[in-house]
Image (cartoon, coloured by chain):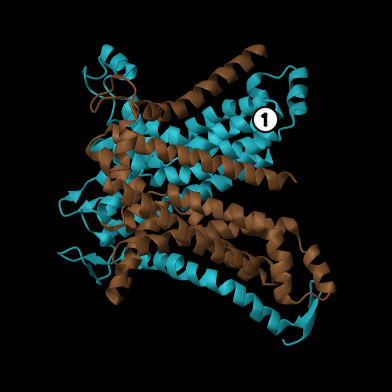
Amino acid sequence: MNKLMIWYGELLSQKSLIKRGFLFLTPGMLWLIIFLVLPGLILIVVSFATRGSYGELVWEFSFENYKRLLGYGIFGWTPDYLLILLRSVIVAIVTTALSVLLSYPLCFFIAGKPERTRYLWLTIVIIPFWTNMVIRTYAWFLILAPEMPFARIAAFFKLISPGMPLYPSAFAVYLGMISMFLPFVALPLFSSVERLDWTLVEAAQDLYSSNVRIFMHAILPQTLPGLSVGVILTFVPAMGMFVVPDLLGGAKYMLVGNLIQQQFGTSRDWAFGAAISMGLMVLTMFSLYLYKRKSKGVDLI
Amino acid sequence: MKKITLIVNIAAISTMAFLYLPLVAVAFFSVNNTKYGLIWKGFTLDWYTKLFQNELILHAAWNTLVLAVVSTVVSTFLGTILAIGMDRFPWPKKMNTVLDMILHLPVIIPDIIFAAAMVVAFGFLRSASTLFEPGLLNMIIAHITFQTAFVALVVRSRLVSIGKDVEEAARDLYAGTTYLLWKVTLPLLTPGIVAGAMLAFTLSLDDFVISFFTAGPDSVTLPLYIFAAVRRMVTPQIHALSTIVLLITIVLVISMERFTRKFNVK
């Protein structure tokens, strides 16, 4: 164990090298273990605990919280919570899909600009990415207000009654979600589109391939690395999002993020909140796993 | 083919308009001379001057700054030495995998779950010491936690890209460990550390969810203030505040871009 070794030009004993390594490693790792790994484990334990009558935690362990999440309550089975979970998954899928759809033209557009102005255009996408999500969400209040053309058009077609805003509604939630997450797809995708080998596209065109085929066989496989990062960066936070549905969806369109927030806020039911968090975590891990398996399949083609 | 280019351009420009329309509206109505409604009543900067007389907003701005600066300084230190510790020593493969997993946790976990875990953890710590009442200290600790992981990831990628050759050469020329660290590794690493610190700072300013869960009544930050305000009523004063936050973001983003571009290209 205590043998001498040469580690990048330095002659020293293995023991002292490891000791030095731990000196560097310990402060940061200790911090992450105390404030990240341990709280995560505690959250798992708490999800099996019970809520006392004053909102305190009672250490009686059961699967009660998970049963409740699956819909088994005092008054029999209701699908309320499951519907919220399902809705969150659907919102996340639609948000991701539409963001991908809008990101491709955007990335091609920026990549097609001359190098001098390209980064200026890219900065235009980066700025919303870093703008605070509360501001970006409530800003839609203004666009969807009754005085604005969009609400007037909707009122003209009798979709809403005149003088009403377009929020809170499912439509507003989707608008808010897509505008929130679009840069999350576009930025990683751009790094792939920028390196795209256009000669393959030209070759496909020379061989009279249809536009769909060009995209599927010449463009998609090349941009897959950036696309995968973008999809994960969008799908995972979109499922847990609570600012957008809170401000733009109201009580009509609750997502799992709101449900968790409610348990830690007004309801003060930490145990149930922890159980919902675990549910969200399982959904996240499951979709990451599915996605990994799926994208491997795409890789092979 | 021309037709496709046209469609792509139109789609791209409408997408950018879609991203910017709400933000432009906020800036536009922040200089509108009326307290209620969205009808243009002339230009004014009143809402901006009134911001600086609002004690609550000034206090929130101060909290935001303290939170961002303190957490960035601590997390940059922790993240940097953690990155060196992970990359520059011969750890067994299994240990590297575990360390790597821990580092990626804040990236992969939805932030609301991390926030929930923090609430529960601080709940327990509170029974040991009143120091952990919801407030600025809890927020700083929570921010440091996710920032440290991001800083470590950025610094580590810089460590990998500069390689170990220069350090080995310094060793061959009889550099001691402290000398090596201060005169060779850290100077080479500076761009990575600065980029990591800028990322941490922006993440802290940008965060809403984690602050929302850990804040106390006395530690309201600007995003929390805006959130609470718009739930009651949207006022031009909030537009003015948001516009200022937006301008600060633009300055930060542009300087961050310039900085990373300068060092990645060379």
Task: Find residue A76 and report its horizontal and vertical position in percent.
Answer: 18, 50
Query: Which residue is the extreme one toward the bottom?
Result: A2
Residue B166 point in image, percent of width and height: 80, 63
Which quarter of the rendering shows the N terminus of chain B? top right
Residue B141 seen by the camera? yes
Colour brown, chain: B
Residue A221 in view of the camera: no
Q: Residue at position x 15%, y 64% from top?
A: A54
Chain drawn cyan in the picture = A
Residue at the spot x=74%, y=31% of the render?
Answer: A197
Q: In the picture, residue A294 is in which quadrant?
A: top right
The residue singled out by tag 1 in the image is A219
Query: In the image, A244: left or right of B261?
Result: left
Please, which chain is the residue tagged with disc 1 on? A
Comparing B106 with B230, the one in front is B230
Task: Give residue A68's quadrant in the image.
Answer: bottom left
Q: Secondary structure at mark 1?
A: helix
